[in-house]
Image (spheres, grey):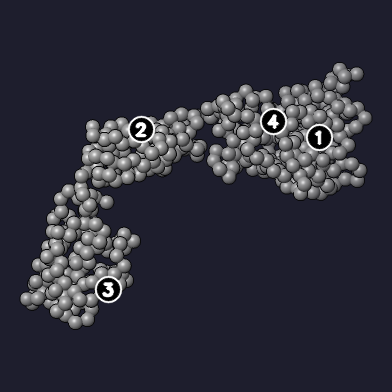
Amino acid sequence: MRKALVGLAICLIMLMVTHESFGVLLCPEPGAGARIIDLFKAVCTECERGPVDTCGQEFSVTLVDVAPGPVSPLVTFTYEVYKYPDDLEGTDLVHWMLGVDLAQFYQYLAPGMTIYDIFADCSTGGIGSECVLIYPDPTTQLEGVKFEAVIGDGETQTFTVTLDDTALLPGIGFGEGCILAATKADHEDIMRTDRPAPGYVCISGPVLRERPIVCPIAQAGSDQNACVDDVVQLNGCTSYDPDGRPLTYSWSILSKPACSMAVLSDETACNPTVTADCAGDYVFQLIVNDGDCNSEPDTVLVKVADCGEYLCPKSLGFWKNHPEAWTADSLTLGCEEYSKMELVVLLNSPSLGDASLILAKQLIAAKLNIEKGSDPAPVGDTIEAADSLLCLYPGKLPYHVSTDVRQGKKMLKLAWILKKYNDGLLTDDCLEW
């Protein structure tokens, strides 16, 4: 009897191929049993996303979308199942199976991973619905993802399954290919001769594919300058993988001064720190890994000087364009105190031959440099003279002093000295920042 049923199923399969259908119509006889599934898999070689109807147009199954998951390198397959209206009792959907080749998935598991690491998530559209892995489902004899959900006449529900290829061996990922799916109404069972068979379809779904191995890119960050005893923070966090896979980090010290005992705070962090304990050059190397392969190494140079406590001055243009770098909320120019907003206005005001504004702008920059940590010694007397000169005028700047008059010429001379200081021409052995 079983041989006769299998033979009949083969005939049905071979006869039900049409140019208008999506591949092959899979219509088993009642009681065809588990052996019919291998025959169905053998002929499921041409498929589309659908919608694909089960025999008798009880249901249709559609692969709606294949898209990156919420976090790379996840991929999500989204399906819709529709129940055609009919007058029969007991034909509402109870569950449906997305037939995935779990044996093949097991074969390509990465070390330390389980099949549940591959199937990162699944979801159903109905309240009280659920999805699980099953090996196999007793009523459809398919193994894969079982979506339990009730769908009545004229209803549609959406289902998703999200896969993670980091659980697979390197060079293996997910693609879209032909797989079996089955819809099971509450009275259907492929193993029983006294009940109708479930509906089977050949549809696009997740399969394993070879994928090119693309190694990640390490970025160890920009070269830095530091002073002895500074805590230097490295930054490799801009390293990336072209496929969006998560990275692990491996830092090392390639070279350091002979006097140094420096060690990295955490060789596996993306941004470790190190204390520069003596002057000289430090070279750090970063290699990142995406689970498939290592990146090419990238290096960063940190030059450490015994520079004391002074930072190098910045130019007038820097302070004008970077008010966020200011450490002072107000400054005294001459005998008047100016708020940060007032100082910004002065820096952006055209000088138009006004010697008081020319001097004030360089004086602002010089005082901001000293507030930031630059050595005040080279211009201490100049700043005092500039303030004394501006104090001769009542109220707040600008004072509209011509560059041709005696006081104006004094202002220009002081402004020239302050400009040399702000441009870094009067300071040595300072720390760039």
| Quarter placement of the N terminus | top right
Give the label, 2 or 4, closer to the camera: 2
Helix, strand or loop at disc 1? Answer: strand
Residue 100 disc label: 4
Horizontal arrangement in the rendering, residue 399 relative to residue 236 (left or right): left
Q: Residue at x 86, y 27 (%)?
A: 191
Circle nearer the N terminus (3, 1):
1
10 Å crowding of disc 1: few (<14), some (14-19), many (20+): many
Q: Earlier in the sequence, mark 3 or mark 4?
A: 4
Q: Which mark is residue 252?
A: 2
The three-letter amino acid code for the residue at tag 4 is Val
- Tell me what residue is drawn at x 17 percent, y 48 percent: 429
Q: Residue 12 at x, y = what percent?
A: 83, 26
Residue sitting farthest toward the right: 194
- The answer to whether residue 136 is above or below residue 304 is above
Cβ atoms under marks 3 and 2 closer than 8 Å: no
The x, y position of residue 139, in whole percent, is 82, 31
Instruction: Kindly identify which residue carries mark 3.
Output: 338
Any part of residue 362 in sight = yes
Asked if 71 appears above or below 44 in the picture, the reply is below
Q: Is residue 61 visible?
A: no
Q: Quadrant of residue 89?
A: top right
